[in-house]
Amino acid sequence: MMATVNRESYAAAVEKLTADTQKATAAQIAITADEILSVARLLRGEPRLRRALTDPSRSGTERGELLRSLLSGKLSAVAVDALVVLASGRWSAPGELLDATERLGVDTALAAADKAARLADIEDELFRFGHVVAGNPQLAVTLSDPTAPVERRAKLAEDLLTGKAQTGTLQLVRVALDGLGGRSFETSLSKLVELTAAKRDREVAYVTAAKVLDDAEEQRLAAKLSDIYGRQVSLKVDVDPSIIGGLSVRVGSDLYDGTILRRLNEARQAFAK
């Protein structure tokens, strides 16, 4: 979680970007997101630049103008202006500016998807891609390998998803490959699913069932969870026959395990004592 001063710096950049893209099309906002994410990748590979842009001995204006001098003519004025506001803010550590830049790019990508009415599609596509990767150990190792060039892994993901997923999904998968906030690829994908759902004002519930749930079962479960959490819930269902029966549901840090497998394991442990 961002410190108060960092949140204020981030909010100022968001406010600037929101004002400047108010009349932009979804495609134009998506391009701005790409530009901001490209700067996040630059900052990730340039620790000296991160330190210079968060140097407390320099004024916010000096730090902002340093970044402007590097980016002007290479990115759109909209992206540059928002990033200058971000760099002009107060940051307690160089890594926090990187995280904020990356998050600004993600939030901008989600704003583009929202304007195009594609948020629900992207949320589902990110989840399904994560599920496909998790089910293929060789693919999971290849995409998660931090020693392999990101561009090569991104090309593989693009080949797998082109024609099957939204452009915004491809954009966010690339963020996951970079490692959102220093997370692993798998954890980054999950975080992006949750951020996409949050943009729709929804919680994400990861459900493991022994068999496919029918529509009525999903609706009952979603309604029950919505009552508990006070907002709509987006179900992400995985079928795993090994749990035998019942359901396992995870929402954030909350886990509800009502599987028969859990009960059998508890009974086995009780008999072993």
Image (spheres, helix red, strand yellow):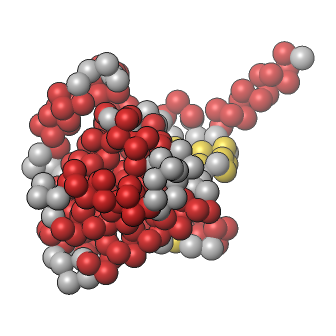
Residue found at the far right of this picture: 273
Residue 125 lies, in percent from the top left, at: 28, 52
- Residue sitting nearer the eye, 84 or 8: 84
Q: Residue at x 18, y 68 (%)?
A: 77
Question: In this rendering, is residue 266 above or below 126?
Answer: above
| Residue 235 seen in the figure | no
Residue 232 lies, in percent from the top left, at: 52, 71
The image quarter containing residue 176 is top left
Residue found at the far bottom of this picture: 23
Number of callouts: 0
Question: In this rendering, is residue 77 above or below 104?
Answer: below
As drawn, is 86 to the left or to the right of 108?
A: right
Residue 178 lies, in percent from the top left, at: 32, 37
| Residue 89 seen in the figure | yes
- Residue sitting nearer the eye, 246 or 83: 83
As drawn, is 271 to the left or to the right of 245?
A: right
Q: Residue at x 53, y 67 (%)?
A: 8
Q: Residue at x 67, y 68 (%)?
A: 228
- Residue sitting nearer the eye, 237 or 124: 124
Q: Residue at x 31, y 33 (%)?
A: 45
